[in-house]
Amino acid sequence: MIDLQSLLATRRRPRLLVRAARLGARDYRREVHLPRVLGYGHLPAPAPALLRLLEIEQDHDDRRRAQDAGYSLSRHLDTLIALVGEAALLESQRRQDDEDNRVDIT
């Protein structure tokens, strides 16, 4: 299984871009923001969505580094906001699953 948290931690992006994404993620609403990045239709579960977002974000970053004329800062930022939001959702679900699986011995 792919460790998504490790994969996210290895990403190196400009601080301002990451900071803006974290601020934007505070208002992240999956049903509104995710379709803008992934396309409209059925929303995938957080883990598959996160994998797809990682691919899209890598493409944006490659374009940014190559100074490609087709690079869009706003699309890159939208993708990073969704990435941070989905990662938080996945972490929240993991914690909830841990609590649900915890056995009360008292």
Image (tube, rainbow, N blue to C red):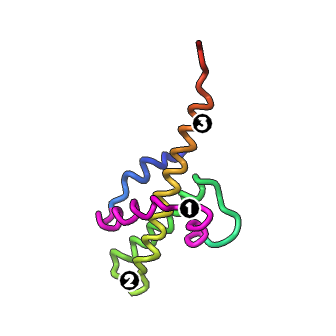
Describe residue 7's horizontal placement relative to residue 36 as left or right. left
Q: Residues within 10 Å of mark 1 (few under 14, many from 20)?
A: few
Q: Which residue is mark 2?
A: 68
Query: Residue 84: percent from the left, percent from the top?
Result: 46, 57
* Image height of 13 relative to 96, above or below: below
Q: Which amino acid, mark 2?
A: Asp
| Quadrant in the rendering for residue 14 | bottom left
Query: Residue 71: percent from the left, percent from the top?
Result: 41, 81
Q: Identify the residue at horizontal 51%, vertical 45% (top origin).
A: 91
Q: Residues within 10 Å of mark 3 (few under 14, many from 20)?
A: few
Please identify the residue farthest to the bottom as the structure is shown.
69
Number of marks: 3
Q: Which residue is mark 3?
A: 97
Say which label, 2 or 1, has the lower sequence index: 1
Q: Which amino acid, mark 1?
A: Arg
Q: Identify the residue at horizontal 57%, vertical 72% (top origin).
A: 36
Residues under labels 2 and 3: Cα distance?
42 Å
Please identify the residue farthest to the top as the structure is shown.
106
Q: Is residue 35 magenta?
A: yes
Residues under labels 3 and 1: Cα distance?
21 Å
Of the 4 image quadrants, the one containing the N terminus is: top right
Say which label, 3 or 1, has the lower sequence index: 1
Q: Which residue is mark 1?
A: 29
Badge 3 marks a residue whose secondary structure is helix
Magenta extent: 13-38
Badge 1 marks a residue whose secondary structure is loop
Q: Identify the residue at horizontal 53%, vertical 56% (top origin).
A: 86
Residues under labels 2 and 1: Cα distance?
30 Å
* Image height of 32 relative to 49, above or below: below
